[in-house]
Image (tube, rainbow, N blue to C red):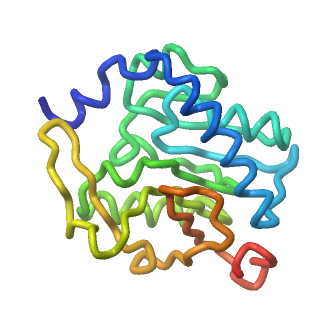
Amino acid sequence: MNAQAYWTQNRYLEPKGAFYQQVTPAVCQQLEAMGFQLGPDDSVFEPGCNMGRHLRALQQWSNCRVAGMDISPHAVANRIVSDITRGDVLTDWNPEESYTMIFTHWFLIHIPASPEKTALIERMKDRAGTVLLLEPVQPRDERPRGCVDHGDHCLSWDDWTQYGFTDVQPNLFKQTSVFIWRKDPVLSGPILN
């Protein structure tokens, strides 16, 4: 099975309540800890957003506008926020609009290093004032180099500082690194400690 077939399967309706009940509010708590504020005039985009659990939490927390894209027809058919479209962000996402923030949560790790991945990250930086990456981390001595192939999907461990991102502290997640890129670093305020 290839990666696209793997991610388009119906994996999103399985009962994972305990996991999402912990992780989704933690996204908002992480933003609060960073001093990041969103409001009704702000917009957030999440590539690989699944059904939109994080987007809905952000919308309820801040009343911001949210949008997302996911490759899974099942996730999009069961979306819990209205502005989620189906598509492959590597090839289908070329927005004209800009966003206050674009964020990922355990998404980019599943894309092997490639010119397409680099181009996606550059498009994200071009279309947002802030790009926030919440991506898994392993201790440096255990981190495999490059992409580890698991047959139907991969785990690609990237050094996000090489893409121009800064490690964020405080980090409220145990198994996730938080990295940020700001279009205007002068306006970074309390986010960059």
Q: Position of residue 175 (x, y in %)?
A: 48, 56
Q: Is residue 107 left or right of residue 31?
A: left
Q: Is residue 103 above or below residue 21?
A: below
Residue at the spot 15% in from the left edge and 49% down from the top edge = 149
Q: Nearer the viewer, residue 167 or 45?
A: 167
Q: Nearer the viewer, residue 90 or 14?
A: 14
Q: Is residue 14 left or right of residue 98?
A: left
Tell me which corner region of the image, top left, top right, bottom left or bottom right, holds residue 148.
bottom left
Q: Nearer the viewer, residue 157 or 9?
A: 157
Q: Position of residue 114 (x, y in %)?
A: 23, 62
Q: Is residue 129 above or below residue 92?
A: below
Residue at the spot 45% in from the left edge and 66% down from the top edge = 122
* Picture quarter with the N terminus: top left
Residue at the spot 54% in from the left edge and 48% down from the top edge = 95
Which residue is the extreme one toward the bottom? 186
- Count of numbered circles in the view: 0
Q: Is residue 72 above or below residue 187?
A: above
* Picture quarter with the C terminus: bottom right
Tell me which corner region of the image, top left, top right, bottom left or bottom right, holds residue 169.
bottom right
Q: Position of residue 167 (x, y in %)?
A: 55, 75
Q: Position of residue 6 (x, y in %)?
A: 24, 29
Residue at the spot 61% in from the left edge and 45% down from the top edge = 45
